[in-house]
Structure formats: C-alpha cells, structure tokens
Amino acid sequence: MQNDYDADPGYAAPPVLTVSALNAQVARLLERSFPLTWIAGEISNFTRASSGHWYFTLKDDAAQVRAVMFRGRAQFAGFTPREGDKVEVRALVTLYGARGDYQINVEAIRRAGVGVLYEAFLKLKEKLTVQGLFDQERKRALPMFTRSVGIVTSPQAAALRDVLIALQRRAPHLRIVLYPAPVQGQMAALKIADAIATASHRAEVDVLLVVRGGGSIEDLWCFNEEVVARAIAGCSVPVISGVGHETDFTIADFAADIRAATPTAAAELAATPRADWMASLAGDATDLRRAMRRMLSEANLNLDNYARRLLSPSAQIGHQRLKLAGMATALTHAVRGPVNRHSFTLAQLRGRWAQHRPDTRALRAELASQQRHCGASIASQLAQRKDALAALSAQLELLNPQRTLERGYAIVRDSRGKVLRSPGAIKPRDTLTVRLAEGSAEVGVASVQTLLE
C-alpha cells in the first residue's frame, strides 16, 4: 500500500536526529531553562575518582539526582563531604550525553545552613566596617621586642599545642599566659570576649593571640560574633588572630591588628626567633668591634702626630729657665735704675730742707708763755661772769610769781584764761579759775563787790 505522504510531492520529511544530537539539544535546553542555582540535599554514594573529580548523589526524602563536581572546582571546596552530610550546592542542571542521564554539574558546595550564616557574616562585616572597626588607621604594630605572649583559646584545643610548640621552638625565653575560653558552642563568644577583656585589663602581656584550629563555619561561628570583634578592637595590647585554616576568614580576623593564616602562623608572627635575635646581636657586636678598632687606629695616628710635634719636657724647661733668667735681669735693671735716681733726689731735697728749716725752740717757749697768760685771763673772766650770774639769779628769784603765790596770793582767770585785775570784769555766776601756789581751783561767783575809796 502506498503512503499518502510519499504521494504528496510538497511534503518534506522531518530531519532525523542522532541520539547524540538529541541529548545535546536536551542538555542545552536544560541549561538555558535552569541557570546556576542553589540546591539542598543529602550526600549519598560519594566517590572521589583518581582524577580528582567528585561523583555523588544528592537526595532528599522523596527524590534524588546524580551530581558531579570536577577537580578544578572541588579543590576549592574547603572540606570533603561524607556520606549523609547535609549540604547546599550551586549547580547547573544538564544532561550527561554519553548515557543520557540527567545530572547536575556542581560549581560550589557548602554545608547546609551556611547560606544563612554567610548572609549574617556579610551583614555584620558591613556594619562594623561602616563604624570604622576595621580601619587600617586603628591597627597597631607589633612590639619589636616581645617579652610575654597571651593566648586566648581552649586548654584542650589542638591549636594551643601547636602555638606552644612554635613558641618553644622560636623563642623559648618568652613568658606565656593562657586566658582559657571555649572556642565552640553556646556562650563561647561571650566567654572569648571576657577572656580578651581580662587580658586587656591586666595588661601583663605584649601581644595577645586569639586562636582556634580549623572547622566548619558553624564551628568557627563564635569568632563571627560582634561581641568578640568589639573586645578585640578595644583590647589594650596588639591582637593577632589565628582562627581556622588559610582559607577561613572570620570577623575576628578583620578586627584584629594582624590576621594569621593558622594558629602556628600566629605564634610565628608574635615572636621573632631567638636565633634571629642572636644573629642580629652577633652582627651588631661585629660592627661594634670593627668601629672600635677603626677609632683606636685613628686615635693612634693622632697620638703619633702629636708626639712628633711635642718637644722634650726637659728641653722645654731649660728653654723657659733661660728665658726667665733674662727677664729677671731685665727686671732688676728696670727697678734699680729708678730707685737709685729717686734716692739721689731725696738726699738732695733733705739737704735743702735742712738749710731752710727754722729754729722752733724759741717759738715753742713763746707759745708756752702765751698759753699760760691766756689761761689766767680766761679763768679771771669766768669768775667775774659767775658772780654777775649769781646776782641776776637772786634778783630773778625775787620777781618769781611762784614766790608771791607761796606768800598767800592767787592769780584769778576768767573762762577765757584772761588774768582779772578789776572786779568790774567779773559778773555773778561766772566761773573763775584760781591759781594757787600748789595748784588751781574752779570757783563760781555769787556776787561782785567793789571797794569804796
């Protein structure tokens, strides 16, 4: 029987696809329809091939899908999944053409719940960055000579052992102070912050290490808490953070003055190796010895030059003695010449003075006679004046008012102090002052009487 399509001359048969072409078209369709997206599930049938690729099944309670993560992506995963792990993968939906199997190509993988934690990490980081907590200007340099190191970590942590081993190897002379705090679990962040605050308050160490070994983001989350970041920023001593492995970053790393890739690296940053210091000191000692030798050589050269220029002390003394003798001779001549001249002049003056000196003996006798005559005259005049003074004193005594008062008389004065001589100047009830020989009295006038002639 003839096919109707074959009879129709205008009919074109559809192209025939190969299986490979079909699978390729389906793969492109899936990749266009489902861009990179995050998918959550549980790891099952995990296999790590010798090529480094990871093959596993991602499943939940109702379905599953095959997954592959190539070596170039797997090496940056940060952990190796295990059977039953809850994970989130960022994958591209595609089709494996060789078998026609639907699968997902994984670009990135993280533990389940990491997405929420990572968002919280980014929000806190942005907040503290805006507040200036991570500014480079507030970062402090490590001291050149570290004498003591503080460590904030759990006493049971492997990181503590690594730090102690590194410090013992590099700088066994350091004093180490442990500020114990849990580094995982509930309330760990608060206890870590308290330990940092204690170290800051005591100020007994030069550098503080905040360390913990590697782990998942959940294990390290206490170092992503704001309270820990603020404690680190407010610490009075420089802080080095060494949390997790090299690829792990926490908020504490940004707040610290220096971030170390590992706890061991933090210990290495905290203290310069003792051998380095000893080598540096040996080099300084060598430079010092070389400088001292050079200075001594220069001093010896200067000493030789001065010695050549220096005369013998005995020769210098002899020369000075000759010079002194010459000066003494010159001084003797200079002094004796004027003395001799002045002595001669003085002898001449004495001779001339002796010739013109008057005879004073007659003058002295005459002076003595005049003194005797003058003394007698003065004595006579004094006697006469004493007699005249006595006569005048007797006359004055007769006229003394006091003698008159002593004979019973009185002096009467009015209120103005005027001496009264006439009764007419007195009025009744006047107050008069009566002067007597041995004092005075105030009297009142009762009446005034005038003597009749």
Image (cartoon, helix red, strand yellow):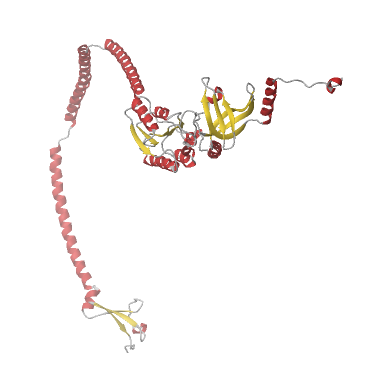
Q: Nearer the viewer, residue 73 or 407?
A: 73
Name the residue furthest front: 1
Q: Could you say where residue 362 lies in the image, as x and y percent from the top left? A: 13, 39
Q: In the shown orientation, is residue 7 left or right of residue 133?
A: right
Q: Residue at x 15, y 57 (%)?
A: 380
Residue 170: quarter of image: top left
User: Position of 188 compared to 331: left or right?
Assistant: right
Query: Residue 53's image quarter?
Result: top right
Number of dots carrying numbers: 0
| Nearer to me, 41 or 38 | 41
Decide which of 16, 194 is in the foreground and name it: 16
Position above or below: 179 against 72: below
Residue 434 picture location, percent across and down:
28, 80
Residue at image location 17% in from the left, 25% down from the top: 347
* Residue 192 at x, y percent in the picture: 42, 40
Question: Quadrant where the C terminus lies?
Answer: bottom left
Q: Nearer the viewer, residue 9 or 341?
A: 9
Quarter holding the N terminus?
top right
Image location (x, y in percent) of residue 222: 46, 39
| Residue 196 image-quadrant placement | top left
Above or below 308: residue 283: below
Q: Residue furthest top?
A: 308
